[in-house]
Image (tube, rainbow, N blue to C red):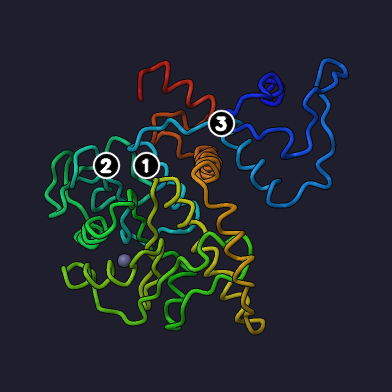
Amino acid sequence: MQIWHQWHAPKVSLPGFMHPATIGIRDHPQLIGGKPTVDSTMNTPKSDLVALAQRRMETAIADNVWTKRQKLALTCRILFEMGHDSGLSGQITTRAEDPGTYYTQRLGLGFDEVTEHNLITVDEDLNVLAGGGMANPANRFHSWIYRARPDVNCIVHTHPLHIAALSMLETPLVVSQMDTCPLYDECAFLDRWPGIPVGNEEGELIAGTLGAKKALFLAHHGQVVTGATIEEACVLAVLIERAARLQLLAMAAGSVQPLDPRLAAEARDWVSTPKRHQAAFAYYARRAVRAGHGACIGFGADAPHFSADEHHHSIATEGGL
Ligand SMILES: [Zn+2]
């Protein structure tokens, strides 16, 4: 249906539409069985196919409509399922509506206990503005990152098992496999452990070492990923633990070989789009709900047919936006 719609507007430049002449599609399509036929793209250059796919994703994949609180609660549940829990360690924050304020989980709750309703709102000094309890004192380094990086809207700091194990070797994270390329040349390394990150000194050190990159691997500690969106930070958190696991497996078997820098950058840019991050997050969210975490967003934990579309509909009809 999406493609048919595009066929009716070949002379107009529309979002998500690439002019037929650039991708080998006829200006005047034939109809077979009520559907348009297209010339083969088998000779279309890779760069054009990449551009076409990206544009189609813009219209073919729905935007996520969960609230910030719901996305943050889902992120906690997703990462719990992905092995990011380490007792009460780790913090997940996102910018709240007012400048200088953030949503985060309440100290004392595990990631599998966080819901959209028990999140708290804090300022950069970690004063609680809404909700009960207190934030993790280590949230202070988040404040330093948010100050330094206006482009960052979400931060995930965790100690997942393979990241924690790799951190003991005082070696940088090596991205050497296609799936983890969103982290290629995007992961800084703090090669010494400054101690518990509750002081402003650690905040300045962590924010400064992160620099302009999206991720930071902390020796003897864990990982920090940032995102322009909650979805991006969540996806990168999933990937950085996978990258560490892959690295440990590969190092145990042989010598890790570097990726071709140009191809690695191409792979990174191919996957690192807001739309792809939204789609990946929605998939992880559905998995988390199927694993029993639906209650964190007020969705029945026993919803076997849960889908992003169904949930979007339920939120819209309830005025939950
Ligand atoms: Zn930590």
Amino acid type at image mark 1: Ala
Q: Give the x, y percent position of residue 201.
A: 17, 73
Name the residue beneath numbered marker 1: 73
Q: Is residue 42 left or right of residue 181?
A: right
Name the residue beneath numbered marker 3: 15
**Callout 2: 10 Å neighbours few (<14), some, many (20+)?**
many
Amino acid type at image mark 3: Pro
**Callout 1: 10 Å neighbours few (<14), some, many (20+)?**
many
| Dot 2 and dot 1 residues touching (CB under 8 Å) | yes
Determine the residue positioned at 82% across, 15% down. 34
Viewer-nearest residue: 201 or 3: 3
Determine the residue positioned at 60% across, 65% down. 264
Quadrant for ligand 1 reads bottom left
Q: Give the x, y percent position of residue 213.
A: 40, 64
Q: Mark 3 or 1 closer to N-term? A: 3
Q: How many marks?
A: 3
- How far apart are the alpha carbons under marks 2 and 1? 8 Å
- How far apart are the alpha carbons under marks 3 and 1? 32 Å
| Dot 3 and dot 1 residues touching (CB under 8 Å) | no
Q: Is residue 48 left or right of residue 127?
A: right
Tell me the quarter of the picture where residue 297 sits: top left
Amino acid type at image mark 2: Leu
Name the residue beneath numbered marker 2: 119
Q: Mark 2 or 1 closer to N-term? A: 1
- How far apart are the alpha carbons under marks 2 and 3? 37 Å
Viewer-nearest residue: 273 or 204: 273
Secondary structure beneath disc 2?
Answer: loop
**Callout 3: 10 Å neighbours few (<14), some, many (20+)?**
few
Secondary structure beneath disc 1?
Answer: helix
